[in-house]
Amino acid sequence: MSLVELIARADERGLAASGLACSDRCVPLLVGDEEVLRPLWAHLADGSDWSASLEKARGALGGADPGEAEAVQLTRGMLDEAPAERTPEALRAWADACSVASLRIHRLLDPAVDDTTPADDVEAERAGGPESASPLVAADLRRQILVLELLAEHGGQGLRRALDVSGEGRRVLRAVVSRRERGRV
């Protein structure tokens, strides 16, 4: 099943986990404390209101800077757009937007993509699969699909594994960013 179909069929918890996982994987672009979103995962697990923790996370990540790189702006935007009230409609729109933003971020940072590489069609990849995507984008697409499948198959019990998948993606992105920084020095 495609990522687009999985998002369309996901329940409230799956949508929230999907958007949160995309944000969580990209948070190394914003802060040193990568655990800043951990309380939001806890709210998903127990079903409690996450609005106060969401505001606290946004505050910890700071405000936007017009001079920020596009990948950083996209990452910040994912959390800025997170719905304080977790309604199915708001979560579906957020999960969908986070999916696109995360894939764009991974494409921007993918070392296999250069100026001669044609722009990936993110929507086509989301509707199809990772076959034509660059390596980093394909890996993120697989992680997005896995998170939604885990929640669809295991409900709340799938949250722990979804958090693990997100952490794995965060480590990969952190390594990519670190390599890029070393290359600039």
Image: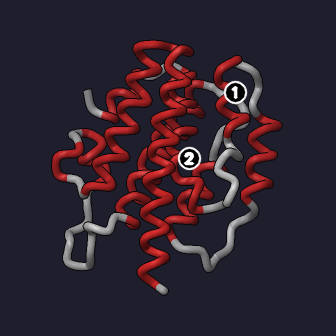
Instruction: Name the amino acid, label 2.
Output: Ser
Badge 1 marks a residue whose secondary structure is helix
Q: In the rendered image, which quarter is residue 176 located in?
A: bottom left
Image side of residue 176 versus residue 123, left or right? right
Q: Earlier in the sequence, mark 1 or mark 2?
A: 2
Image side of residue 97 versus residue 5, left or right? right
Dot 1 corresponds to which residue?
42
Identify the residue at image location x=24%, y=58%: 134
Image side of residue 173 versus residue 133, left or right? right
Name the image quarter holding the N terminus.
top left
Q: Residue furthest left?
A: 131
The local crowd at label 1, few if under 14, some if 14 to 19, many if 20 or more residues have their Cα within 10 Å, is some
Identify the residue at image location x=64%, y=42%: 82
Residue 130's spot in the image, x, y percent?
23, 45
Badge 2 marks a residue whose secondary structure is helix
Residue 72's spot in the image, x, y percent?
56, 65
Above or below residue 62? Residue 41 is above
Q: Residue furthest bottom?
A: 185
The local crowd at label 2, few if under 14, some if 14 to 19, many if 20 or more residues have their Cα within 10 Å, is many
Above or below residue 150? Residue 53 is below
Figure label count: 2
- Name the disc covering residue 98, or none: none
Instruction: Name the amino acid, label 1.
Output: Ala
Dot 2 corresponds to which residue?
23
Is there a contact, CB below 8 Å, between mark 1 and mark 2?
no
Closer to the camera in the image, 143 or 86: 143
